[in-house]
Amino acid sequence: MIEVVGDSSRDGEVALVRLAVEGDRIVDADTDGLGRPLRGLTLLEAAAVPGETLAADALANALSQVFRAEPDPGRVAVAMSGGVDSAVALLRGGPQAVGVTLRLWIDPEAPDSERACCSPEAVIAARETCHALGLPHVTLDLREEFRRAVVAPFVRGYARGETPNPCIRCNGSFRFAELLAFAERAGASRLATGHYARIVEHRGRRLLARGHDPGKDQTYMLARLDPRLLDRIWFPLGEQTKEETRAEAGRAGLAAARRTESQEACFLGGGDYRDFLGRHGVEQAEGEILDEQGRRLGSHDGFWRFTPGQRRGIGVAAGKPLYVLRTDSGANAVVVGPRESLAVETISARGRLYVRVNRAEVKWRYRSPAVPAAVEETEHGFRLLLDAPAYGVAAGQAAVLYEDDVVVGAGVL
């Protein structure tokens, strides 16, 4: 028998839950504020018990330490963010779905942390969505793990003069690794998420493909997922539009139908990444702004505040528009020049090709248009020979390769 304790506090109030667990069943419980007694319930059944917010939080914190369930081929684990997309994915999961939400680290000084997809408020919204449908919900507190695996590399990348994308690191490794591990512990046959993407057969492999809604396609953020994991993943919204998703949620009476979008780079909580980096250890030191010939044009208070391709906010005047061409972390310098000096025709990336291709379309920003390129495989990734010059390409960005609508490779520049 195992004894676990979960607690929760808010606005000076505290709730405490004690459970005695044997196997996957609760044999004794000390609780208050829940919708029904827990004694005799399985852990899966207990995860579906509603209650007052603090009591439900405390129960969730206790269950997360020991949660497991016997395998069931009909069970689907559904990643829940508290938003409309994951709520509809939960509907698609059917009567044996179990929701799971990752509570991740958010900058405590963020201006709008409540909108983040991993905030305490989002966790509560996700749990209430599950409980309103009579379904279990489990919260995994991974704040410190997320900080080490995603936030710290983001800070280090900028300190090196790169432009990293933390959402790709999160989705391509950390988030799905944790969610798939939970699905196995929950006895679920697969994991569903509310991402707008599809999984297709392409050249003899299961690979990611763009979602039906071009305005919501999320394959760029998911591109570094190992294709070997796709047999266990399901994207139920990949064939529909965002408008159809909201309408479906509305018909089902889900509160999430009216919820606003969560933010990218959730740990920023709506704040500016430059302010965040300044608070979290990246040195703020005055340096020089130089032209291509090395002549001093002005000064700045940190090279990492500038990104290749940036035009606004450089802080120097010239007879024609100037763009950030590159930054030098060692010298704490920013080099600026005309737009034509940004042009690159060859890009190298560390990563992998999922299938061999000679040509593909490449994206290095989520919202950038895809550019045709010749592809050469290298020892540690691939090299791209672009059909037309690219502008504003920066080290640390992700390069995602598409053949038609299918992701055939991904790496970091």
Image (cartoon, grey):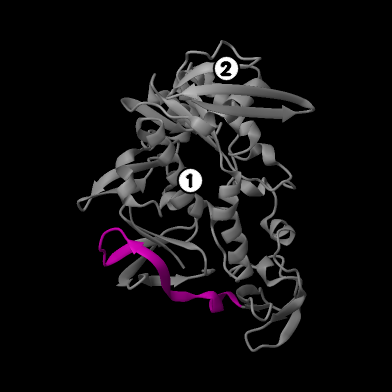
In whole angstroms, how far apart are the C-alphas of marks 2 and 1? 32 Å
Viewer-closest of 384 and 67: 67
Name the side, left or right, on which 246 lies relative to 260.
Answer: left
Image: magenta residue range: 338-360
Mark 2 and mark 1 in contact? Answer it, CB < 8 Å: no
Q: Position of residue 411 (x, y in %)?
A: 41, 63
Give the residue pinned by disc 1. 175
- Kindly identify the residue that appears in the image at 56 percent across and 11 percent down: 37
Mark 2 lies on a secondary structure that is: strand
The reply, left or right, for residue 177 in relation to residue 285 is left
Residue 345 forms part of the magenta stretch: yes
Q: Badge 1 local density, few (<14 within 10 Å), some, or many (20+)?
A: many
Residue 195 x, y percent position in the rendering: 44, 40
Tell which circle, 2 or 1, labels the residue nearer the N-terminal end.
Answer: 2
Residue 61 part of the magenta-drawn span: no
Q: Amino acid at mark 1?
A: Arg
In the picture, the disc for residue 29 is 2
Whether residue 158 is visible to the viewer of this picture, yes or no, is: yes
Picture residue at 67% right of the left edge, 46% below the top: 270
Residue 309 position, x and y percent, is: 59, 68
**Which residue is rendered at x = 64% and y = 77% of the image?**
336
Q: Is residue 334 left or right of residue 84?
A: right
Is residue 67 depicted above or below 402 in this figure? above
- Tell me the amino acid under the disc marked 2: Ala
Callout 2 crowding tier (Cα within 10 Å): few <14, some 14–19, many ≥20 = some
Of the two numbered discs 2 and 1 in the rendering, the one whose residue sits closer to the viewer: 2
